[in-house]
Image (cartoon, rainbow, N blue to C red):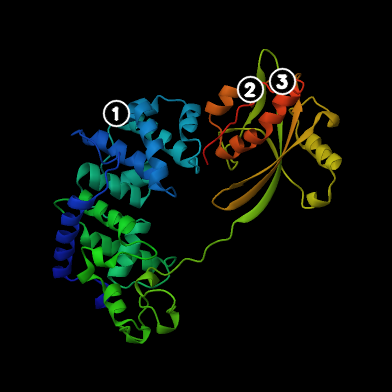
Protein backbone atom coordinates (compact mmCIF):
# COMPACT_ATOMS: atom_id res chain seq x y z
CA UNK A 1 0.00 0.00 0.00
CA UNK A 2 2.89 2.39 0.75
CA UNK A 3 3.93 2.52 -2.89
CA UNK A 4 0.46 3.80 -3.84
CA UNK A 5 0.94 6.97 -1.77
CA UNK A 6 3.38 9.89 -2.01
CA UNK A 7 6.17 10.37 0.47
CA UNK A 8 6.75 13.87 1.87
CA UNK A 9 9.82 14.20 -0.33
CA UNK A 10 7.91 13.12 -3.45
CA UNK A 11 5.17 15.67 -2.74
CA UNK A 12 7.74 18.46 -2.51
CA UNK A 13 9.50 17.37 -5.70
CA UNK A 14 6.24 16.99 -7.65
CA UNK A 15 4.94 20.41 -6.61
CA UNK A 16 8.16 22.16 -7.49
CA UNK A 17 8.63 20.39 -10.83
CA UNK A 18 5.01 20.79 -11.92
CA UNK A 19 4.87 24.53 -11.17
CA UNK A 20 8.17 25.25 -12.96
CA UNK A 21 6.97 23.26 -15.97
CA UNK A 22 3.52 24.89 -15.96
CA UNK A 23 4.90 28.42 -15.83
CA UNK A 24 6.99 27.68 -18.90
CA UNK A 25 4.76 25.42 -20.99
CA UNK A 26 1.10 26.17 -20.21
CA UNK A 27 -1.11 26.78 -23.23
CA UNK A 28 -2.56 30.22 -23.85
CA UNK A 29 -6.29 29.67 -23.37
CA UNK A 30 -8.92 32.42 -23.11
CA UNK A 31 -10.15 31.36 -19.67
CA UNK A 32 -6.60 31.77 -18.37
CA UNK A 33 -6.09 35.13 -20.07
CA UNK A 34 -7.64 37.41 -17.48
CA UNK A 35 -6.33 40.63 -16.01
CA UNK A 36 -9.00 41.02 -13.34
CA UNK A 37 -8.00 41.12 -9.73
CA UNK A 38 -11.66 40.69 -8.79
CA UNK A 39 -11.87 37.07 -7.62
CA UNK A 40 -15.63 37.10 -8.27
CA UNK A 41 -15.02 37.73 -11.99
CA UNK A 42 -12.32 35.05 -12.05
CA UNK A 43 -14.69 32.57 -10.36
CA UNK A 44 -17.33 33.25 -13.01
CA UNK A 45 -14.85 32.74 -15.85
CA UNK A 46 -13.61 29.49 -14.32
CA UNK A 47 -17.16 28.21 -13.80
CA UNK A 48 -18.14 28.93 -17.40
CA UNK A 49 -15.00 27.29 -18.80
CA UNK A 50 -15.21 24.22 -16.58
CA UNK A 51 -18.85 23.49 -17.43
CA UNK A 52 -18.18 24.01 -21.13
CA UNK A 53 -15.17 21.69 -21.01
CA UNK A 54 -17.15 18.80 -19.56
CA UNK A 55 -17.34 16.11 -22.29
CA UNK A 56 -16.09 18.65 -24.87
CA UNK A 57 -12.66 19.21 -26.43
CA UNK A 58 -10.71 22.41 -25.80
CA UNK A 59 -10.55 23.36 -29.49
CA UNK A 60 -14.35 23.25 -29.72
CA UNK A 61 -14.92 25.19 -26.50
CA UNK A 62 -12.69 28.19 -27.28
CA UNK A 63 -15.05 29.78 -29.83
CA UNK A 64 -18.12 29.19 -27.66
CA UNK A 65 -16.38 30.54 -24.57
CA UNK A 66 -15.30 33.77 -26.27
CA UNK A 67 -18.79 34.35 -27.69
CA UNK A 68 -20.35 33.65 -24.29
CA UNK A 69 -18.04 36.02 -22.41
CA UNK A 70 -18.60 38.79 -24.94
CA UNK A 71 -22.33 38.45 -24.43
CA UNK A 72 -22.37 37.86 -20.66
CA UNK A 73 -19.07 39.07 -19.12
CA UNK A 74 -20.20 38.62 -15.51
CA UNK A 75 -22.65 36.74 -13.34
CA UNK A 76 -25.15 39.63 -13.24
CA UNK A 77 -25.46 39.88 -17.01
CA UNK A 78 -25.96 36.12 -17.32
CA UNK A 79 -28.59 36.11 -14.57
CA UNK A 80 -30.68 38.66 -16.48
CA UNK A 81 -30.49 36.75 -19.79
CA UNK A 82 -33.40 34.69 -21.12
CA UNK A 83 -33.13 30.90 -21.26
CA UNK A 84 -33.74 31.03 -25.03
CA UNK A 85 -30.73 33.32 -25.51
CA UNK A 86 -28.58 31.10 -23.30
CA UNK A 87 -29.52 27.96 -25.22
CA UNK A 88 -29.03 29.79 -28.54
CA UNK A 89 -25.46 30.67 -27.54
CA UNK A 90 -24.85 27.08 -26.42
CA UNK A 91 -26.41 25.43 -29.50
CA UNK A 92 -23.97 22.90 -30.96
CA UNK A 93 -22.05 22.18 -27.73
CA UNK A 94 -24.49 19.48 -26.64
CA UNK A 95 -25.30 18.37 -23.08
CA UNK A 96 -27.66 21.34 -22.80
CA UNK A 97 -28.27 20.88 -19.08
CA UNK A 98 -24.83 22.47 -18.62
CA UNK A 99 -26.14 25.72 -20.13
CA UNK A 100 -29.30 25.64 -18.04
CA UNK A 101 -27.27 24.95 -14.90
CA UNK A 102 -24.94 27.88 -15.63
CA UNK A 103 -27.96 30.13 -16.03
CA UNK A 104 -29.51 28.86 -12.78
CA UNK A 105 -26.17 29.29 -10.96
CA UNK A 106 -25.98 32.93 -12.02
CA UNK A 107 -29.55 33.62 -10.93
CA UNK A 108 -29.03 31.91 -7.57
CA UNK A 109 -25.75 33.76 -6.90
CA UNK A 110 -27.40 37.10 -7.73
CA UNK A 111 -30.62 36.44 -5.82
CA UNK A 112 -29.26 34.66 -2.73
CA UNK A 113 -25.63 35.80 -2.45
CA UNK A 114 -25.87 39.40 -3.70
CA UNK A 115 -23.88 38.56 -6.82
CA UNK A 116 -20.88 37.24 -4.86
CA UNK A 117 -19.68 33.67 -5.45
CA UNK A 118 -19.84 31.56 -2.28
CA UNK A 119 -16.35 30.47 -1.28
CA UNK A 120 -17.32 27.57 0.93
CA UNK A 121 -16.79 24.26 -0.88
CA UNK A 122 -19.86 22.58 0.63
CA UNK A 123 -22.11 25.49 -0.32
CA UNK A 124 -20.85 25.37 -3.91
CA UNK A 125 -21.46 21.62 -4.16
CA UNK A 126 -24.83 21.56 -2.38
CA UNK A 127 -26.35 24.82 -3.60
CA UNK A 128 -25.06 25.58 -7.10
CA UNK A 129 -26.81 23.53 -9.84
CA UNK A 130 -24.46 21.35 -11.86
CA UNK A 131 -21.46 22.04 -9.60
CA UNK A 132 -19.86 18.94 -8.16
CA UNK A 133 -16.71 18.32 -6.17
CA UNK A 134 -14.39 18.76 -9.15
CA UNK A 135 -15.89 22.04 -10.42
CA UNK A 136 -16.08 23.45 -6.89
CA UNK A 137 -12.42 22.53 -6.35
CA UNK A 138 -11.41 24.25 -9.59
CA UNK A 139 -13.32 27.46 -8.81
CA UNK A 140 -12.16 27.64 -5.19
CA UNK A 141 -8.50 26.91 -5.92
CA UNK A 142 -8.10 29.05 -9.05
CA UNK A 143 -10.29 32.03 -8.11
CA UNK A 144 -9.93 32.10 -4.33
CA UNK A 145 -6.53 30.36 -3.82
CA UNK A 146 -8.05 27.81 -1.45
CA UNK A 147 -6.10 24.51 -1.20
CA UNK A 148 -8.87 22.25 -2.50
CA UNK A 149 -8.06 19.33 -4.84
CA UNK A 150 -9.55 18.53 -8.23
CA UNK A 151 -10.05 15.22 -9.99
CA UNK A 152 -11.02 15.17 -13.67
CA UNK A 153 -10.11 12.65 -16.37
CA UNK A 154 -6.69 14.17 -16.99
CA UNK A 155 -5.78 14.28 -13.31
CA UNK A 156 -7.02 10.71 -12.78
CA UNK A 157 -4.69 9.56 -15.54
CA UNK A 158 -1.67 11.41 -14.14
CA UNK A 159 -2.21 10.21 -10.58
CA UNK A 160 -2.96 6.63 -11.65
CA UNK A 161 0.36 6.47 -13.46
CA UNK A 162 2.34 8.22 -10.76
CA UNK A 163 1.20 5.72 -8.11
CA UNK A 164 0.25 2.70 -10.26
CA UNK A 165 -3.45 2.74 -9.46
CA UNK A 166 -4.79 -0.05 -11.66
CA UNK A 167 -8.05 -0.80 -9.86
CA UNK A 168 -11.53 -0.26 -11.27
CA UNK A 169 -12.40 3.46 -11.44
CA UNK A 170 -16.04 2.63 -10.75
CA UNK A 171 -15.15 1.47 -7.25
CA UNK A 172 -15.56 4.04 -4.49
CA UNK A 173 -12.31 2.88 -2.88
CA UNK A 174 -10.43 3.80 -6.07
CA UNK A 175 -11.92 7.28 -6.45
CA UNK A 176 -11.53 7.99 -2.72
CA UNK A 177 -7.85 7.08 -2.95
CA UNK A 178 -7.33 9.26 -6.03
CA UNK A 179 -9.01 12.20 -4.30
CA UNK A 180 -6.69 11.75 -1.33
CA UNK A 181 -3.65 11.72 -3.63
CA UNK A 182 -4.88 14.92 -5.31
CA UNK A 183 -5.31 16.51 -1.89
CA UNK A 184 -1.75 15.51 -0.93
CA UNK A 185 -0.32 17.31 -3.96
CA UNK A 186 -2.26 20.59 -3.65
CA UNK A 187 0.21 23.38 -3.03
CA UNK A 188 -0.98 25.78 -0.28
CA UNK A 189 0.88 28.71 -1.86
CA UNK A 190 -0.37 28.20 -5.44
CA UNK A 191 -3.27 25.72 -5.32
CA UNK A 192 -4.92 26.93 -8.54
CA UNK A 193 -1.73 26.72 -10.58
CA UNK A 194 -0.84 23.31 -9.16
CA UNK A 195 -4.28 21.95 -10.03
CA UNK A 196 -4.08 23.42 -13.52
CA UNK A 197 -0.59 21.98 -13.99
CA UNK A 198 -1.96 18.48 -13.36
CA UNK A 199 -4.76 19.03 -15.88
CA UNK A 200 -2.32 20.51 -18.38
CA UNK A 201 0.11 17.64 -17.96
CA UNK A 202 -2.65 15.10 -18.62
CA UNK A 203 -3.90 17.01 -21.65
CA UNK A 204 -0.54 17.58 -23.37
CA UNK A 205 2.08 15.11 -22.04
CA UNK A 206 0.49 12.27 -20.06
CA UNK A 207 -2.00 11.46 -22.81
CA UNK A 208 -4.11 8.28 -23.02
CA UNK A 209 -2.11 6.86 -25.92
CA UNK A 210 1.57 7.40 -26.66
CA UNK A 211 2.35 9.58 -23.63
CA UNK A 212 5.45 11.77 -23.99
CA UNK A 213 7.22 10.32 -20.95
CA UNK A 214 10.63 11.72 -21.95
CA UNK A 215 9.19 15.27 -21.71
CA UNK A 216 7.43 14.74 -18.39
CA UNK A 217 8.64 17.00 -15.55
CA UNK A 218 7.74 14.40 -12.89
CA UNK A 219 9.02 11.31 -14.69
CA UNK A 220 11.29 10.39 -11.77
CA UNK A 221 8.31 10.20 -9.43
CA UNK A 222 6.25 8.03 -11.83
CA UNK A 223 5.98 4.37 -10.84
CA UNK A 224 4.32 3.40 -14.12
CA UNK A 225 7.30 4.75 -16.06
CA UNK A 226 9.65 2.92 -13.71
CA UNK A 227 7.78 -0.30 -14.50
CA UNK A 228 7.98 0.39 -18.22
CA UNK A 229 11.77 0.60 -18.08
CA UNK A 230 11.76 -3.10 -17.17
CA UNK A 231 9.62 -3.75 -20.27
CA UNK A 232 8.14 -6.90 -18.81
CA UNK A 233 4.89 -7.57 -16.98
CA UNK A 234 6.63 -10.23 -14.91
CA UNK A 235 8.81 -7.53 -13.31
CA UNK A 236 5.84 -5.66 -11.85
CA UNK A 237 6.38 -5.39 -8.13
CA UNK A 238 3.28 -6.36 -6.21
CA UNK A 239 2.54 -4.90 -2.77
CA UNK A 240 0.98 -8.18 -1.80
CA UNK A 241 -1.26 -10.78 -3.31
CA UNK A 242 -4.22 -8.97 -1.70
CA UNK A 243 -3.41 -5.45 -2.95
CA UNK A 244 -6.53 -3.96 -4.53
CA UNK A 245 -4.69 -1.23 -6.46
CA UNK A 246 -1.98 -3.18 -8.29
CA UNK A 247 -2.51 -4.58 -11.75
CA UNK A 248 -1.99 -8.32 -11.89
CA UNK A 249 0.40 -9.75 -14.52
CA UNK A 250 -2.56 -11.47 -16.19
CA UNK A 251 -4.15 -8.04 -16.78
CA UNK A 252 -1.22 -6.78 -18.86
CA UNK A 253 -1.69 -6.49 -22.63
CA UNK A 254 1.69 -6.84 -24.35
CA UNK A 255 0.50 -4.79 -27.34
CA UNK A 256 0.44 -1.63 -25.20
CA UNK A 257 3.12 0.06 -23.13
CA UNK A 258 2.88 -0.45 -19.38
CA UNK A 259 2.25 3.27 -18.81
CA UNK A 260 -0.82 3.10 -21.05
CA UNK A 261 -2.35 0.45 -18.77
CA UNK A 262 -3.03 3.16 -16.16
CA UNK A 263 -5.72 4.02 -15.38
CA UNK A 264 -7.66 0.82 -16.01
CA UNK A 265 -9.55 1.13 -19.27
CA UNK A 266 -13.26 1.73 -18.92
CA UNK A 267 -15.58 -0.58 -20.78
CA UNK A 268 -17.19 1.62 -23.42
CA UNK A 269 -20.96 1.61 -23.58
CA UNK A 270 -22.05 1.03 -27.14
CA UNK A 271 -24.22 3.76 -28.59
CA UNK A 272 -27.72 2.51 -29.18
CA UNK A 273 -29.03 2.93 -32.71
CA UNK A 274 -32.26 4.86 -33.15
CA UNK A 275 -34.26 6.06 -36.15
CA UNK A 276 -36.71 8.95 -36.20
CA UNK A 277 -39.11 10.37 -38.75
CA UNK A 278 -38.85 14.17 -38.92
CA UNK A 279 -41.42 16.42 -40.60
CA UNK A 280 -40.45 19.94 -41.68
CA UNK A 281 -43.61 22.01 -42.10
CA UNK A 282 -43.36 25.22 -44.10
CA UNK A 283 -45.51 28.04 -45.45
CA UNK A 284 -44.88 30.82 -47.94
CA UNK A 285 -46.04 34.32 -47.11
CA UNK A 286 -43.70 37.14 -48.08
CA UNK A 287 -40.93 34.63 -47.35
CA UNK A 288 -40.53 31.01 -46.37
CA UNK A 289 -41.37 30.16 -42.77
CA UNK A 290 -40.97 26.89 -40.86
CA UNK A 291 -43.10 25.63 -37.99
CA UNK A 292 -41.05 24.57 -34.97
CA UNK A 293 -41.83 22.97 -31.63
CA UNK A 294 -40.21 23.79 -28.29
CA UNK A 295 -38.97 20.55 -26.72
CA UNK A 296 -40.23 19.59 -23.27
CA UNK A 297 -37.78 19.70 -20.36
CA UNK A 298 -37.69 15.90 -20.14
CA UNK A 299 -36.59 15.42 -23.76
CA UNK A 300 -33.08 14.83 -25.07
CA UNK A 301 -32.93 18.38 -26.50
CA UNK A 302 -35.10 19.95 -23.80
CA UNK A 303 -35.75 23.66 -24.13
CA UNK A 304 -34.52 23.81 -27.74
CA UNK A 305 -36.61 24.42 -30.84
CA UNK A 306 -37.05 21.41 -33.10
CA UNK A 307 -38.88 20.19 -36.15
CA UNK A 308 -41.55 17.58 -35.55
CA UNK A 309 -39.88 14.31 -34.66
CA UNK A 310 -41.39 10.88 -34.07
CA UNK A 311 -39.43 7.80 -33.02
CA UNK A 312 -39.98 5.23 -35.74
CA UNK A 313 -41.76 1.96 -34.89
CA UNK A 314 -39.70 -1.26 -34.73
CA UNK A 315 -41.05 -2.46 -38.09
CA UNK A 316 -40.41 0.78 -39.99
CA UNK A 317 -38.12 -1.06 -42.47
CA UNK A 318 -41.14 -3.05 -43.65
CA UNK A 319 -43.37 0.05 -43.97
CA UNK A 320 -43.90 1.59 -47.39
CA UNK A 321 -43.86 5.37 -47.81
CA UNK A 322 -47.61 5.75 -47.48
CA UNK A 323 -47.66 3.83 -44.19
CA UNK A 324 -44.79 5.96 -42.88
CA UNK A 325 -46.64 9.16 -43.79
CA UNK A 326 -49.83 7.84 -42.19
CA UNK A 327 -47.84 7.08 -39.05
CA UNK A 328 -46.51 10.67 -39.04
CA UNK A 329 -49.99 12.17 -39.38
CA UNK A 330 -51.29 9.99 -36.55
CA UNK A 331 -48.45 11.03 -34.23
CA UNK A 332 -48.19 14.77 -35.00
CA UNK A 333 -51.08 16.99 -33.95
CA UNK A 334 -49.73 20.41 -35.02
CA UNK A 335 -50.42 20.10 -38.74
CA UNK A 336 -53.18 20.74 -41.25
CA UNK A 337 -51.69 18.99 -44.30
CA UNK A 338 -52.83 15.64 -45.67
CA UNK A 339 -50.89 12.56 -46.66
CA UNK A 340 -50.44 13.63 -50.30
CA UNK A 341 -48.76 16.89 -49.25
CA UNK A 342 -45.93 15.07 -47.47
CA UNK A 343 -42.77 14.51 -49.51
CA UNK A 344 -39.56 12.64 -48.70
CA UNK A 345 -36.49 14.92 -48.51
CA UNK A 346 -33.81 12.37 -47.61
CA UNK A 347 -31.85 11.20 -44.58
CA UNK A 348 -29.06 12.37 -42.29
CA UNK A 349 -27.21 10.98 -39.30
CA UNK A 350 -26.12 12.55 -36.02
CA UNK A 351 -24.05 11.01 -33.24
CA UNK A 352 -25.07 11.88 -29.70
CA UNK A 353 -23.01 10.69 -26.73
CA UNK A 354 -25.18 7.60 -26.27
CA UNK A 355 -27.30 7.46 -29.44
CA UNK A 356 -26.41 6.85 -33.07
CA UNK A 357 -29.35 8.67 -34.60
CA UNK A 358 -30.69 8.30 -38.13
CA UNK A 359 -33.24 10.88 -39.31
CA UNK A 360 -35.65 10.13 -42.18
CA UNK A 361 -36.76 13.58 -43.27
CA UNK A 362 -40.10 14.63 -44.78
CA UNK A 363 -41.48 18.05 -45.62
CA UNK A 364 -44.93 19.46 -46.32
CA UNK A 365 -46.68 22.74 -47.08
CA UNK A 366 -48.86 23.77 -44.15
CA UNK A 367 -50.22 27.31 -44.35
CA UNK A 368 -53.18 26.86 -42.00
CA UNK A 369 -51.53 25.92 -38.69
CA UNK A 370 -51.77 28.62 -36.04
CA UNK A 371 -48.84 28.90 -33.61
CA UNK A 372 -49.44 27.90 -29.99
CA UNK A 373 -47.51 28.32 -26.75
CA UNK A 374 -45.32 25.37 -27.81
CA UNK A 375 -45.02 26.14 -31.54
CA UNK A 376 -43.74 29.08 -33.53
CA UNK A 377 -43.12 30.02 -37.17
CA UNK A 378 -39.44 30.73 -37.92
CA UNK A 379 -37.93 32.44 -40.94
CA UNK A 380 -34.89 30.82 -42.54
CA UNK A 381 -32.63 33.33 -40.79
CA UNK A 382 -34.24 32.58 -37.42
CA UNK A 383 -33.69 28.85 -37.93
CA UNK A 384 -30.00 29.57 -38.50
CA UNK A 385 -29.60 31.77 -35.42
CA UNK A 386 -32.04 30.45 -32.79
CA UNK A 387 -31.60 27.88 -30.04
CA UNK A 388 -31.68 24.87 -32.34
CA UNK A 389 -29.51 21.76 -32.03
CA UNK A 390 -26.86 20.77 -34.54
CA UNK A 391 -28.92 17.67 -35.32
CA UNK A 392 -31.95 19.74 -36.34
CA UNK A 393 -29.76 22.06 -38.42
CA UNK A 394 -28.52 19.01 -40.30
CA UNK A 395 -32.16 18.05 -40.92
CA UNK A 396 -32.87 21.58 -42.17
CA UNK A 397 -29.85 21.44 -44.44
CA UNK A 398 -31.30 18.36 -46.16
CA UNK A 399 -34.87 19.66 -46.47
CA UNK A 400 -34.38 23.33 -47.37
CA UNK A 401 -33.18 23.04 -51.01
CA UNK A 402 -36.11 20.77 -51.90
CA UNK A 403 -38.58 23.01 -50.08
CA UNK A 404 -37.34 26.01 -52.05
CA UNK A 405 -37.63 24.18 -55.34
CA UNK A 406 -41.18 23.14 -54.54
CA UNK A 407 -42.23 26.48 -53.06
CA UNK A 408 -40.98 28.46 -56.02
CA UNK A 409 -42.25 26.04 -58.70
CA UNK A 410 -38.89 24.57 -59.58
CA UNK A 411 -37.10 27.90 -59.95
CA UNK A 412 -33.67 27.93 -58.35
CA UNK A 413 -34.31 30.77 -55.95
CA UNK A 414 -31.78 31.20 -53.15
CA UNK A 415 -30.35 27.71 -53.44
CA UNK A 416 -26.87 28.76 -52.44
CA UNK A 417 -25.15 26.01 -50.48
CA UNK A 418 -25.65 26.02 -46.77
CA UNK A 419 -23.21 24.59 -44.30
CA UNK A 420 -23.72 24.09 -40.60
CA UNK A 421 -20.82 23.25 -38.29
CA UNK A 422 -20.84 19.76 -36.75
- The one of 15 and 303 positioned closer to us in this rendering: 15
Find residue 114 and name its label. Answer: 1
Q: Residue at 21% across / 54% down in the picture?
A: 194
Q: How crowded is mark 1: few (under 14 residues within 10 Å), some or many (20 or more)?
A: few
Helix, strand or loop at disc 3? strand
- Circles 2 and 1, Cβ within 8 Å, touching? The answer is no
Q: Distance between the residues labelled 2 and 1?
A: 50 Å
Dot 3 alpha-carbon crowd within 10 angstroms: few under 14, some 14 to 19, many 20 or more: many
Q: In this view, does 257 lie above or below 295?
A: below
Residue visible at 26% across and 45% down?
A: 140
The percent coordinates of residue 116 (x first, y second) are: 27, 33
Q: Is mark 1 on a helix, strand or loop?
A: loop
Q: In this view, does 193 lie above or below 167?
A: above
Residue 15 against residue 388 in the figure, above or below: below
The residue that disc 2 covers is 414
Nearer the viewer's eye, disc 2 or disc 1? 2
User: What is the x, y in percent for residue 191?
Assistant: 20, 51
Residue 87: where, in percent of width, then height? 49, 32
Please give left or right for residue 310 compared with residue 188 in the image. right
Tag 3–tag 1 contact (CB < 8 Å): no
Q: How many numbered tags mark residues here?
A: 3
Label 3: which residue? Answer: 283
Amino acid sequence: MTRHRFSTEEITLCRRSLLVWYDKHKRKLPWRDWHDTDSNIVAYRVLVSELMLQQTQVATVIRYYETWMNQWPNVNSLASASEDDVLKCWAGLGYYNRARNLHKCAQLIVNEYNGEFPRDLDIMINRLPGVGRYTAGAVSSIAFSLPNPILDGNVIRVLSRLRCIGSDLKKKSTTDHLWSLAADLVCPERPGDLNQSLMELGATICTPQKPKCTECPIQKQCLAYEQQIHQSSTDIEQCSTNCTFCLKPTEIDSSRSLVEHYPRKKVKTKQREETSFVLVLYRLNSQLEFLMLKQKQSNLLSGLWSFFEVISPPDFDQMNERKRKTFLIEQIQHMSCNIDDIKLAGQCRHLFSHIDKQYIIYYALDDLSIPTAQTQWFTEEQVLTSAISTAMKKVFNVALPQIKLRAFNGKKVGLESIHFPG
